[in-house]
Structure formats: structure tokens, C-alpha cells
Amino acid sequence: MNLAGLWVICYLFRPSWRSTVIVTLISATVIGITLLFTDIRYYLGLSGVLHALFAYGALQEALQGRKSSWLLVLGVTIKVAWENIYGASEATSQLIAAAVATQAHAIGFSVGLALALLVALYHTRLQHNP
């Protein structure tokens, strides 16, 4: 399921290898460290990293002027908020035969948005201060 998610993200956003690796490494590190402070005893999978990659790609496209990408940002925001308020769907838990790590999704989502904003800020400063 994670591989299918990665394929969808790569198809939608066509990220460079460099940005994919950087977002993956940073988000995996932040997720791993942050989950130490939760009640999660173990975490398997890449769903948090996939949320980071999706949020990063969607917000980056939206900030670059692709208006339809704001719908993707809104959609993933609603999804993560829903999971944190009401919990993950029972169908997803049954499909993966485990509890869904909604904390990892929220952390990954936040890291992805933060990285997209940092990259946009960096490019804006480069343009204004040659």
C-alpha cells in the first residue's frame, strides 16, 4: 500500500530525486524522534513520510501558482484533522491488520508543509537579494 502511495505522489507531483530524498530523510528523522514522545511502542511503514511528501508536493505546487493544488492541500488537511479528531477508519486498520499511526500522519503532514514553506521562502529571498 505504501508503494502505491509513493507511485501516486510521484505521478501527481513529478518531484525531483533530490527533493524526494531530502523530504524523506528529514520527515523520517522528525517522525522517528517525535514518536518517542507518544504512547506508540512501534511504528511500521512509511505512511508518515508519504503524508510529508504529499503535503510538500501539494503546497509547493500551490505556492507556484497551480490553483488546483490548493484543493489537494485542503483535502490532506481535512484528512489529517479528521483522523486526529475521530480516529482512522476501521477499514484501513483491517486492511493493514494494525492500528493506524495517526500521529505519524500528522507529524509528516506538518513537516511536509514546513519544508515547502521554507523552500518557498528561500527562493523568494534569492529572487529579492541577488
Image: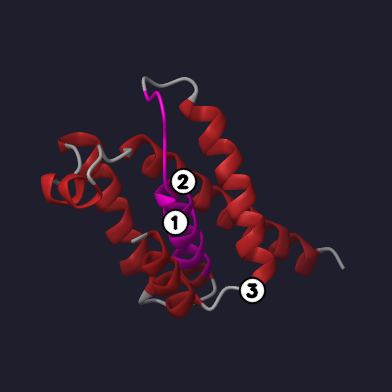
Q: How far apart are marks 2 and 3 (CA)?
A: 19 Å
Q: Which of marks 2 and 3 is nearer the N terminus?
A: 3
Quick check: 63 above or below 36? Answer: below
Label 2 neighbourhood size at 10 Å, few (<14), some (14-19), many (20+)? many
Rendered location of residue 68, percent (x, y):
35, 77
Quick check: 88 above or below 20? Answer: above
Q: Is residue 43 magenta?
A: yes
Q: Residue at x 20, y 35 (%)?
A: 85
Label 1, on which residue?
Answer: 50
Report helix, strand or loop for mark 3.
loop
Between 72 and 50, which is closer to the camera in this rendering? 50
Q: Quadrant of the C terminus?
A: bottom right
Labelled pair 2, 1 in contact (Cβ < 8 Å): yes
Rendered location of residue 67, percent (x, y):
39, 76
Q: Residue at x 36, y 20 (%)?
A: 39
Rendered location of residue 61, percent (x, y):
50, 72
Magenta segment, which residues? Answer: 40-60
Label 1 neighbourhood size at 10 Å, few (<14), some (14-19), many (20+)? many
Q: Which of marks 2 and 1 is nearer the N terminus?
A: 1
Rendered location of residue 48, percent (x, y):
43, 47
- The numbered disc on residue 16 is 3
Mark 2 vs mark 1, foreground winner is 1
Between 114 and 127, which is closer to the camera in this rendering? 114
Quick check: 9 above or below 56? Answer: below
Q: Main secondary structure of the magenta part?
A: helix
- The type of residue carrying mark 3 is Ser
Label 2, on which residue?
Answer: 108
